[in-house]
Image (cartoon, rainbow, N blue to C red):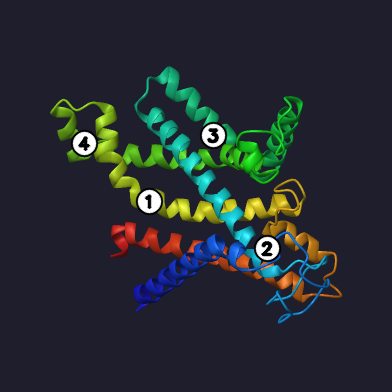
Amino acid sequence: MKKKRKDIFLWIGIGYLVALVVFAIVGPSIFKGTFDVVGAPHQGAGAPDALIGTDNIGRSFLPRLAYGARISLGVGLAVQFLSLLVGITVGVLGEFAPKWISVPLMRLTDGMFAFPDILLAILLIGVTRQSWVADGGSSGGGGLLAVLPDGLLPVIVALSITAWPTIARLTKTQIASLKDREFVVAARASGASVPYIVIKHLLPQMTGVLLAVSMIDLAGTILAESTLSFLGIGVQPPSPSWGSMINDARSNMNSYPIELLWPCLILSLTIFALNFVGDGLRNLADPKSK
C-alpha cells in the first residue's frame, strides 16, 4: 500500500512536469502580454486578454508565468547537464587517476562544500558579469549573449560551478562501491581499459541514482535561480522570471495579494513535483525498496 502511494506521487509529479514543459513551450506564443501591456494594471482574473489578471503595469500574468517556466527549466537543465558532465568526470578521476591528480581534485571538491551556494553564486555572478562588461560583452552584443535574456548566462555559469561537487562526491562513492564487483573484475581480467569499464559497466549501474539525485538538484537549481532573480541579480527585466515576478508582486501584496499567489504557486508546485519524481526514481533504483 505504501509503495502504491509513492507510485501515485511519482506519476502526479511526472504529469505536472509534462504539462509544465508544454506550458513553457507554447504558452508565450498562445497568450498575449509577455512583454507588452494588454490592459489596466492590477486587473483581476477574467480580464480581456488576461485570464488570471495583469501585473503592476498591465502585462498579462499567464504568458509571463509561461516564459518564466521556460527560463527556470532552461537554467535548471543547463546547470544539471554541466554539473553532471563536470561532476562525473571529477568523480571518475578521483577514483581512477594517479594520486597527484585525484587527491587535489577531491580536496578541491571538499573545499567547495565550505562555501554557501547562494553566496558563492552571487559572488560569481558579480565577477562574471563585470568581466563580460569590461570585455565589451552584453546581451546587446553579438553571438550567444544577443540571443539569451539579459543576466541568464552568468546565472547558468554561477549555479553550475556550485552544483558539480555534489555529483562528483556521489560519483566517486558509487564507483568505489562498484569497482570491485564481479563484472568489473571480469572486465579488467579480459583486458578492458578504464574508460571502457566506466562507460560500459559502471555508468549504466549508476544511471538510476544519478537521475534521481539530478531531479532533486534540479529543484534546488530552479529555487536558486528564482532566489537570485528575486534579489535582482538574476535574469533582468523585461524578461520575466518567477523570482522577479514574486519581487514585483511583493511591493503590492497588501493591496493585491492575489498577484503574489500565481508565481509562488507555480514555483512551489514545480519544486514539489521534482521532489516527488526524484523520490520515486530513487525508490525504483533502490533494490531494497522492491
Which residue is labeled 4 in the image? 184
Crowd around label 2: few <14 · some 14–19 · many ≥20 (10 Å): many
Q: Residues within 10 Å of mark 3 (few under 14, many from 20)?
A: some
Q: CA distance from mark 2 to mark 4?
A: 51 Å
Quarter of image, res 84: top left
Q: Residue at x 46, y 24 (%)?
A: 103
Give how far across and how far down residue 186 sits, in percent: 15, 34
Which three-letter amino acid code belongs to the residue tagged 3? Asp
Q: Is residue 94 above or below residue 154?
A: above
Q: Is residue 114 visible?
A: no
Q: Which residue is mark 2?
A: 64
Mark 2 or mark 3: name the one nearer the start of the chain: 2
Q: Is residue 263 above or below residue 157?
A: below
**Amino acid type, residue under disc 4 in the picture:** Val
Residue 236 lies, in percent from the top left, at 74, 48
Residue 119 percent coordinates (x, y): 70, 42
The residue at the point 58 percent across, 48 percent down is 75
Q: Secondary structure at mark 2?
A: helix
Looking at the image, is mark 2 or mark 1 nearer the viewer? 2
Number of other residues with Cα within 10 Å of mark 1, as a class: few under 14, some 14 to 19, many 20 or more = some
Cα gap from disc 4 to disc 3, whole angstroms = 27 Å
Circles 2 and 4 in contact, beta carbons < 8 Å: no
Q: Which residue is mark 3?
A: 110
Q: Looking at the picture, which amino acid does disc 2 mark?
A: Arg
**CB atoms of marks 2 and 3 within 8 Å:** no
Of the image marks 3 and 1, the number of the one nearer the N terminus: 3
Residue 280 seen in the figure: yes
Amino acid identity at mark 1: Val
In the image, is 66 to the left or to the right of 41? left
Of tags 2 and 3, which is closer to the observer?
Answer: 2
Task: Tell me which label, 1 or 4, sits earlier in the chain.
Answer: 4
- According to the picture, the residue beneath numbered tag 1 turns out to be 209
